[in-house]
Amino acid sequence: MNPLWLENLRIALGSVRSQSLRTFLTIMIIAIGIMALVGILTAIDVIKDGITSNFTTMGANTFNIRNRGSNVRIGRSGKRPPVYRYISYDEAVRFKKEFTFPAKVGISCVGSRTSTIKSGALKTNPNIAIFGGDENYLITSGYELEEGRNFSFQELNSGSNVALIGQEIKKNLFPNTSPIDKEIMIGAVKVKVIGLLKEKGSSFGFGGDKIALLPLKNVRRQFSSGTNSYVINVLANSPEILDATIAEATGLFRIVRKLKIKDELNFDITKSDNLSALLIDNLSFVSVAATLIAIITLIGAAIGLMNIMLVSVTERTREIGVRKAVGATATKIRNQFLIEAIVICQLGGLLGIALGILMGNAVSSYFNQGFIIPWLWMILAAVLCLIVGLLSGLIPAIKAAKLDPIEALRFE
């Protein structure tokens, strides 16, 4: 590195120490902006990876038929999407009976997403999802059994009080023992555990490990509200026939719902990869919000830094005069103050990046993902800090460079 640049860097660090309070406040403002940018964008990357991996476990040859509009958000115009009739139990059962294409069909519904499950003195948080499913729910939803067994025909037909539970329930209620054949309380109902699901990780509202799966008829009996909408999960025998299976399923379900040829679909058919893409697309709004927060914060930091640098120029007028008197050119003076501004910004950027990585990986830990080093966002943050340093230091640097050495030496 050029010795002159090293000297300017040394002077810049000395100036930072001499104005420690003002510099510290500016560094913190910059750090907060960078932390918001790096932290939120890292967290979004974690969530995207989790969504992708979660739906990948469902396979490339699965799709579901669900109530239309259940995955549609309100548009930018503020208008709500049309309300469509729920898929009834009878419609789902009829489809399953009449669908003869080479595929497996499972029916499910949500009983509750905020249940508390108890066993003796132990209980879970009120965040357990209660699902009703049939004999094909596990295979069509990407779940596997770690212990125990699936529902028997008799249990499904009678709606017995039996359950398959996720790892979150085991961890809270049976930390040191097998849950098989143990009894749990779901509300006021005593239920026997017959199966433990393998760990699946967070599923962002789609069950995951915080799930208790009961026979479909049991959930209909206990949690029926008159507005339950049933989901039909279909697993094609191979990915090659997925499109043909979807076409056949669409035609049959139009018949089941008594739609005429000219009627539009009043249900959605969603492949697992399409659903994950929809969820990831919704996260783009969070990315934009994070970027705007960071930019607004950095603009405030730039104004504060420019003020510090202008005050610094005034306080060091005699020093500038001495440097010019002994041969320092206007360019060298300008570069010195620009480097000081950049140093302050980069110190704030480094602190913000460190805090942002911690923030992002806290989210990663919550969703059971690995440690992430967001190189792209770190580079973006460093570039933004460089730009902020240049822009906020330019005017003070030009002012310092234009000082007349005679007037500067006479300054008191």
Image (cartoon, helix red, strand yellow):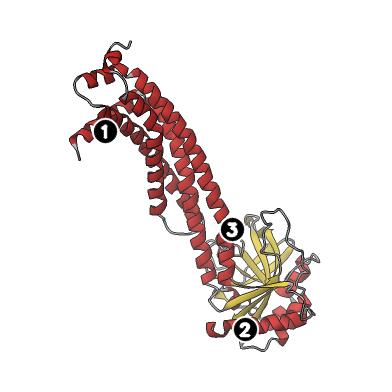
Question: Quadrant where the C terminus lies?
Answer: top left
Q: Of the residues under marks 1 and 2, which one precedes in the sequence?
A: 1
Residue shown at the point (76%, 81%) measured from the top left: 261
Amino acid marked by disc 3:
Asn
Question: Are circles 2 and 3 on residues that touch, CB within 8 Å?
Answer: no
Question: Which image quarter: residue 387?
Answer: top left
Q: Is residue 233 left or right of residue 367?
A: right
Q: Nearer the viewer, mark 1 or mark 2?
A: 1
Residue bearing mark 2: 245
Amino acid marked by disc 1:
Leu
Question: Which image quarter: residue 169?
Answer: bottom right
**Eyeballing the image, is 183 above or below 373?**
below
Q: What mark, if any, has residue 100 been given in the picture?
A: none
Residue shown at the point (40%, 36%) measured from the top left: 391
Residue bearing mark 3: 282
Nearest to the observer: residue 386 or residue 129: 386
Nearest to the observer: residue 404 or residue 371: 404
Tell me if residue 166 can be seen: no
Question: Quadrant where the N terminus lies?
Answer: top left
Residue shown at the point (65%, 82%) measured from the top left: 247
Amino acid marked by disc 2:
Thr
Percent position of residue 221, x then y: 78, 70
Task: Specify few, some or many for label 3: CA neighbours under 10 Å numbering under 14, 14-19, or 20 or more.
Answer: few
Percent position of residue 312, x then y: 36, 22
Q: What mark, if any, has residue 9 been given in the picture?
A: 1
Nearest to the observer: residue 338 or residue 183: 338
Tell me the element at label 2. helix
Tell me the element at label 3. helix
